[in-house]
Each structure stands twice: as C-alpha cells, then as structure tokens.
Image (spheres, rainbow, N blue to C red):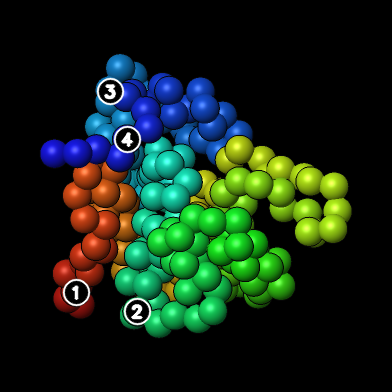
C-alpha cells in the first residue's frame, strides 16, 4: 500500500508544528504518526486529532482531506470557495492558488469553505497582493486553515452527533495518509433512549 505520510513518528509532527500542536495535552511516546492519531481518537480528543492530522498530511493532501470532510459535513453542498480549493488540489498552479486566496480573503469567516480557500491560498507563494512585495504565509497556515474548516463545519451538526462526525473525518484522514481513499463515512445514526 502506498503512503502519504510526511512523518514517520508522532514526535516529528510535533517538532515540525509546535505552535499548532502545543495545546494537545497528550504527549506522543514512540508511536508512529498514525498510531498517535488513533490514540487521540481513543482518548476522545477529536479536535486535537483534527489538528494533528491536518499537520500530518502534506499541504495539498490536507486541503483535499478538508474538502472531503466539509463536503460530507455539509451534505455535499458546495460554493465558489470550496470549488476553488478543489481546483487548486487538482491543478496546484499559481493561478489556482491565487484564485482560492482571493475568495478566502473576502469570504465569510463563519463558513467552513472560506477556510479551505485560505488553506489552498496559504499553501505556498506570496499571500500579498500581486503588485506588492512578496510575503509568504507561515509554514503552518494551511494546516491551521484546514483544521478550522473542519471544525467550523462540524459544529453545524447537532451537538450529540459532532464527536462521531469528527471521528469519521479523522478516520478518513488516517486512511488517506496510509494511501487509501479519503471518503468520509457518515457515522451511524444514534437512537434516542
């Protein structure tokens, strides 16, 4: 099976993204990067697991994972910002990155797809206007934006369902990191007691 893992073990992920992962209270031991993601899920640390997987995947893969999660969480609805992020994943050129950045910069920050457009826009190159001196995005900007996109979409679900949906997104990210499909499988419907 092919792999999309950027890091062999969890400690490497934390070393590469200390600002993003600094709030995770579970400290990685000697486990692999995927084992740690599963450890976070088992400990019911779904928000932490989303942040971690967003850092674990390379920028392009993280944006694609975020797009698939937001689509699943929003019942496959899309808008221009989501389509721009997906276009950049399919064709990671400067023109598609700039188009996503532009939509993200003017988008509603309460909408998950705005954050996905920003994730694509902050994937490399300058984030300054075209006629300005270049300004690079921070190395963790894409991961942060993907994390926010998924969490903004997840909190739109009914409160009792949110942990299961977050878990489904993290499981999809783990499968994708290991070389599998990124399809987000809807959690089983809870029955009221």
Total numbered labels: 4
Q: Nearer the viewer, mark 1 or mark 2?
A: 2
Separation of residues labelled 1 and 2 (CA atoms): 18 Å
Residue name at image x 26 percent, y 57 percent: 182
The x and y percentages for residue 83 are: 48, 74
The disc, 2 or 4, on the residue closer to the chain's N-terminal end is 4
The disc, 1 or 2, on the residue closer to the chain's N-terminal end is 2
Q: Nearer the viewer, mark 2 or mark 4?
A: 4
Residue 31 numbered tag:
3
Residue 76 numbered tag:
2
The disc, 4 or 1, on the residue closer to the chain's N-terminal end is 4
Separation of residues labelled 4 and 1 (CA atoms): 31 Å
Compared across the picture, whether 71 is left or right of 122 comes to left
Q: On screen, 36 above or below 169? A: above
| Residue 74, visible in the rendered structure | yes
Q: Nearer the viewer, mark 2 or mark 3?
A: 2
Say which of 91 and 48 sits in front: 91
* Residue beneath disc 4: 5
Separation of residues labelled 2 and 4 (CA atoms): 27 Å
Image quadrant assignment for residue 5 = top left
Location of the C terminus by quadrant is bottom left
Compared across the picture, whether 120 is left or right of 188 comes to right
The disc, 1 or 3, on the residue closer to the chain's N-terminal end is 3
Tag 4 secondary structure: loop
For label 4, count other residues whose C-alpha is less than 10 Å away and answer few (under 14), some (14-19) or many (20+): some
* Residue beneath disc 1: 189
Residue name at image x 32 percent, y 71 percent: 72
For label 1, count other residues whose C-alpha is less than 10 Å away and answer few (under 14), some (14-19) or many (20+): few
Tag 3 secondary structure: loop
Residue name at image x 32 percent, y 24 percent: 8
Say which of 96 and 177 sits in front: 96
Q: On screen, 8 above or below 54? A: above
């Amino acid at each position: 099976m092919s792999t999309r893992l950027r890091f062999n073990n969890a400690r490497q992920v934390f070393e590469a993204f200390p600002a993003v992962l600094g709030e995770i209270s579970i400290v990685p031991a000697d486990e692999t990067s995927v084992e740690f993601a599963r450890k976070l899920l088992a400990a019911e640390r779904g928000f932490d697991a989303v942040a971690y997987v967003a850092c674990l995947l390379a920028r392009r893969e993280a944006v694609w994972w975020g797009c698939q999660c937001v689509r699943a969480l929003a019942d496959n609805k899309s808008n221009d910002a989501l389509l721009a992020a997906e276009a950049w994943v399919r064709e990671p050129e400067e023109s598609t990155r700039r188009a996503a950045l532009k939509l993200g910069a003017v988008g509603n920050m309460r909408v998950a797809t705005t954050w996905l457009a920003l994730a694509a826009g902050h994937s490399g190159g300058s984030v300054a206007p075209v006629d300005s001196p270049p300004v690079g995005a921070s190395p963790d900007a894409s991961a942060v934006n993907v994390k926010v996109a998924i969490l903004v979409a997840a909190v739109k679900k009914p409160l009792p369902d949110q942990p299961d949906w977050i878990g489904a997104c993290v499981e999809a990210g783990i499968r994708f990191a290991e070389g599998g499909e990124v399809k987000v499988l809807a959690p089983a419907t809870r029955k009221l007691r």
